[in-house]
Image: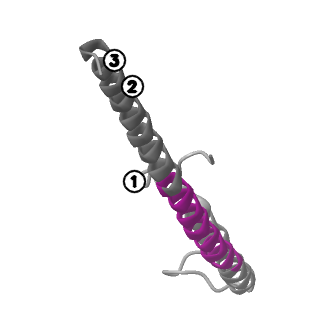
Amino acid sequence: MSKTLQATWRSDRDAQDLVANLSLGVRQMTLFLTKFDTHARSQLASLNEQLTYLERHLAFLEAKTGAVMGAGIGLNNETPKESQSTLLEPSTSVPPPPPPL
């Protein structure tokens, strides 16, 4: 074979190897991102279930506390109205939650 033919063949083979390596890298990255997406969605669904449970439990406790306070039993000898207003005021030390995605 001539030198130019060998150089061309070697150049083509190097290009094919590069394309194969890039293709493998893209395939591996796609698999990783797919697994990551599935895992993240699963974790978010689990967290959503836990938050839903906590919200329901909190609503129950608020309703129960409101019923007790409505009956005239306040905290620290406060009137029910004063006690309710301090419970419902937002705390300034806790930052608001992030916006939903």
Q: Earlier in the sequence, mark 2 or mark 3?
A: 3
Please state which of residues 35 and 96 is positioned toward the viewer in this rendering. Answer: 35
**CA distance for labels 3 and 1:** 75 Å
Q: Quadrant of the N terminus?
A: top left
Q: Is residue 66 above or below residue 45?
A: below
Is 71 one of the magenta-colored residues? no
Q: Give the amino acid at mark 1.
A: Ser
- Contact flag, marks 3 and 1 (Cβ < 8 Å): no
Mark number, residue 5: 3
Can you tell which of label 2 and label 1 is closer to the viewer? 2
**CA distance for labels 2 and 3:** 11 Å
Quadrant in the picture for residue 48: bottom right
Secondary element type, mark 1: loop
Q: Is residue 26 above or below residue 56?
A: above
Q: Earlier in the sequence, mark 3 or mark 1?
A: 3
Please name the predominant secondary structure of the magenta segment in the image.
Answer: helix
Residue that mark 1 sits on: 93
Secondary element type, mark 3: helix
- Contact flag, marks 2 and 3 (Cβ < 8 Å): no
Q: Position of residue 68 (x, y in %)?
A: 70, 86
- Contact flag, marks 2 and 1 (Cβ < 8 Å): no
**CA distance for labels 2 and 1:** 65 Å
Which stretch did the figure color magenta?
Answer: 32-56
For this orientation, the residue located farthest to the top is 4
Q: Position of residue 52 (x, y in %)?
A: 68, 73
Residue that mark 2 sits on: 12
Please state which of residues 43 and 2 is positioned toward the viewer in this rendering. Answer: 2
Q: Residue at x 38, y 41 (%)?
A: 21
Can you tell which of label 2 and label 3 is closer to the viewer? 3
Q: Give the amino acid at mark 3.
A: Leu
Q: Is residue 40 above or below residue 3?
A: below
